Image (cartoon, rainbow, N blue to C red):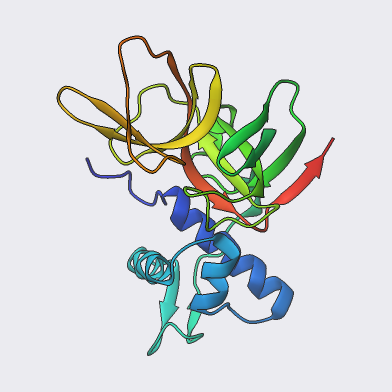
Amino acid sequence: MRRPENRLTERETMVLCEICRHLRQHDRVPGIRELAAALSLQESSVKYILNSLRKQGCIERSASWSRNYKVLKPFDEKELVTIPIVGFLKNDRVLAFRSPPVGEARITCADGNSDHELFALQVLQGGPLSGSASPGDLLVFRKRSVPTTGNTAIVNLNGDMKLVKFKLARNAVMLHGDQEMPFHLRPSDRLRVDGILILSFSNAEVTMF
């Protein structure tokens, strides 16, 4: 399925927003390493997203992605959305998941009209699946109860809330997480999916209550 014309993905929106923020604060665009560090992304992922932004006319480069590019279509901060921070994550375990929220954050989102479908957890300490996140970073999830293979999600498994990665097979559902071997769901297990991971932020505007 082709995406709507002129519609950026969440990650493209996130990168463009960070470029514009850095440009306003430092009067220059950030390099690949700076973007990767700020957004908890691999440098190869940043290069891929920058190429996509270039093809869509948002940025323009001369020779390399070092810092030899300029912004053609700045990010409009009116597109920032406010989402609730509903708890904390330590070693991929959810320490709190409650309402009312413990805080809120203003973030970028490709679909600003669906912010009610988003929520965040603040990282206290990274784990096997959130290892690239640093303390204080936010992991943003979209409410969805039906994951697909490769999705990282917050689940409630037999009363234990944690971060897992799904692998779906014809006759089995496997969860990859803090255990050494994949966990195969059994008919007696109780599983609820609370949200699918879509973004991580290290520089979101956060207000804790």
For residue 129, above or below residue 100: below
Q: Is residue 133 left or right of residue 190?
A: right
For residue 208, above or below residue 86: below
Looking at the image, the residue that sits furthest to the top is: 188
Q: Position of residue 86 (x, y in %)?
A: 68, 30
For residue 80, above or below residue 72: above
Q: Is residue 5 left or right of residue 198?
A: left
Q: Position of residue 38 (x, y in %)?
A: 60, 65
Looking at the image, the residue that sits furthest to the bottom is: 63
Looking at the image, the residue that sits furthest to the front is: 180
The residue under the point 47% across, 86% down is 66
Q: Position of residue 200 (x, y in %)?
A: 55, 50
Q: Is residue 137 left or right of residue 184?
A: right
For residue 69, above or below residue 13: below
Looking at the image, the residue that sits furthest to the right is: 209
Q: Quadrant of the image for the C terminus?
A: top right
| The image quarter in which residue 23 lies | bottom right
Q: Is residue 60 visible?
A: yes
The residue under the point 54% across, 17% down is 159
Q: Is residue 101 or residue 171 the one in the foreground? A: 171
**Count of all numbered marks drawn on residues in the image:** 0
Q: Is residue 204 or residue 92 the one in the foreground? A: 92
Q: Position of residue 171 (x, y in %)?
A: 16, 22
Q: Is residue 110 visible?
A: no
The residue under the point 32% across, 22% down is 185
Q: Quadrant of the image for the N terminus?
A: top left
Q: Is residue 58 or residue 10 the one in the foreground? A: 10
The residue under the point 54% across, 33% down is 113
